Image (cartoon, rainbow, N blue to C red):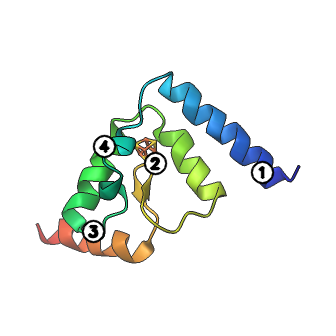
Amino acid sequence: MTARRQDTGSLLLAVAAALDGRDRVCASEPGLWFSDDLGEVAEAIDGCHACPAMAACGALADVAHEKYGVWGGQHRDGTVRRRLRLRQAAA
Ligand code: SF4
């Protein structure tokens, strides 16, 4: 087993342990977590901040090199993150 695959397995277990049987809030509205609409992206990020698995989920997305959507309270596409920062700065 490769180190990356082992990391992914342990992080998946860490996510499940943090959720402790509760549903992931992102599972109920997956469209928000993969939206390009900045308002929806901000809503998804807020949802992650209320999620007990945020740290493990973010680490899992790092290991998996996720490039799309919101994982662990952060959009994985740098372009979307920049657009969101500009929008927040202008507000
Ligand atoms: S941190 Fe966000 S993306 Fe990860 S499981 Fe929780 S709600 Fe879903």
* Helix, strand or loop under label 3: helix
Q: Quadrant of the C terminus?
A: bottom left
Residue found at the very far right of the displayed protein: 1
Identity of the residue drawn at 28% across and 68% down: 85
The residue beneath circle 1 is: 5
Do residues under tags 4 and 1 come within 8 Å of each other at their CB atoms?
no
Q: Few, some or many C-alpha atoms within 10 Å of disc 2 (few <14, some 14-19, many ≥20)?
A: many
Q: Identify the residue at the far top of this view.
A: 20
Mark 1 is on which residue type?
Answer: Arg
For badge 3, the amino acid type reads Leu
Q: Amino acid at mark 2?
A: Gly
Residue at disc 2, secondary structure: loop
**Residue labelled with disc 4:** 47
Q: Callout 4, which amino acid?
A: Gly
Distance from Cα at disc 2 to Cα at disc 4: 10 Å
Q: Secondary structure at mark 1?
A: helix
The residue wearing badge 3 is 84
**Cα separation between marks 3 and 4:** 16 Å
Q: Is residue 43 left or right of residue 56?
A: left
Kindly identify which numbered label has been placed on residue 72. Answer: 2
Regarding ligand 1, which quadrant of the image does it lie in? top left
Q: Position of residue 54 (x, y in %)?
A: 46, 40
